[in-house]
Image: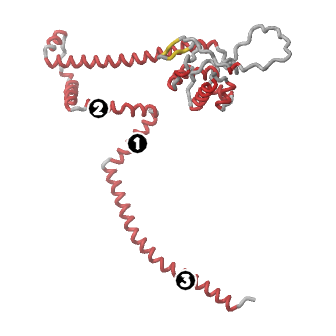
Amino acid sequence: MSDPTKTELTLIAERLDALTAQVARLAERPRQDDLYDELVPVVRAMMGSAMGRLDAMERDGTLAFVRELGGVGQKVLANFSAADVRQLGDAVVTILETVRTLTQPDVMRVAADAGEAIQHADSAKPMGLFGMMRATKDDDVQRGMAVMMEVLRRVGHGVNAIAAKQQHADDKKAKLAEILGPKRQRKVLGTERAAPPKALPPPTPVVKAAPPAPACAVPAKPGQVAAVIDGVAFTADGNLVDAAAWTRGLATALADAERVALTDAHWAVLDAARADFAATGSSPNIRRLTQVAGVSTKDLYVLFPRAPGRTIAKIAGLPKPAGCL
């Protein structure tokens, strides 16, 4: 049996411990209250200062300017793509140099004088041909005409350069379309196998035949050069003559000609096809592509709807694959 005296002493000790903890909390409370009393004025002063600054910014128009600047940013996001902003970043040095040239004091004075003349154009007297001829005797008019002719010459030079660049791009697309277009028209969509012969020879009895080697294991023979575009040779089928001449930029141009918009999924298939060609020396057919690229035949037709095997070989810069599914 337990000692009653010992049990009562234990209860008394527990009550004393509880009282001691309560007294400690009561003793600590004034310290917390003092800290609160000290922090409240500081926080109020900080809030008052912040509100005062915001009020001053509202009065001097800073906040309104920030709001309008945010609206400009929203308009930029709505009307320009990331590629447009990237091009702007690439051209920002040229833009700043042009602005610096136009804002030189001498240039600004000339612009101000020209603006003033335009502003008072209603007071200028009409001038005929002989009046213009007499005006050309003035040194300032002669110098102005020389400057205008130089400006026109430089503008014309720039316009001709832009037109030549556009014409070069159009010629390049036309050559690609000339090579690739007829083949696409004659090709039956969604097929890679050659059309069967009209009449099959009668079967001959065979006791036992060795399994034929897969046709796609035979490397494609180098094609004859049918056209050279920007130094790159193409066969009559539209494939590269030399797979080593392939670049990702050329692949993008070839994909545009095939009406294929390349995504990461397209690039994964193209890279797998080129890696398999480097390892085997032959262009992979559809069955092989499903193995090396890890995609299904259905996915290949989704990515490359028009004859996937042929299209992938063209864009990947590989020879025409052998006739296998």
Q: Which mark is residue 269?
A: none
Residue at left 19%, top 30%? 106
> Residue 69 versus residue 30: which sits nearer the camera?
30
Q: Quadrant of the C terminus?
A: top right
Q: Which residue is mark 1?
A: 70
Query: How many numbered callouts?
Result: 3
Q: Nearer the viewer, mark 1 or mark 3?
A: 3
Element under label 3?
helix
Alpha-carbon neighbours of circle 3 within 10 Å: few (<14), some, or many (≥20)?
few
CB under 8 Å between callouts 2 and 1?
Answer: no
Compare marks 2 and 1 and give the one earlier in the sequence.
1
Q: Is residue 157 above or below residue 66?
A: above
Residue at left 55%, top 22%? 255
Residue 91 located left or right of residue 215? left
Alpha-carbon neighbours of circle 2 within 10 Å: few (<14), some, or many (≥20)?
few
Residue 162 located left or right of residue 150? right
Element under label 1?
helix
Q: Quadrant of the N terminus?
A: bottom right
Q: Is residue 15 above or below residue 33?
A: below
Amino acid type, mark 1: Gly
| Residue 30 position by quadrant | bottom left
Question: Residue 83 appears at what percent x and percent y?
Answer: 45, 32
Amino acid type, mark 3: Thr
For the residues labelled 1 and 3, the Cα–Cα distance comes to 61 Å
Q: Which mark is residue 99?
A: 2
Q: Which residue is mark 3?
A: 20
Amino acid type, mark 2: Val
> Residue 298 versus residue 122: which sits nearer the camera?
298
Question: Residue 26 appears at what percent x and percent y?
Answer: 50, 79
Q: Is residue 143 above or below residue 28?
A: above
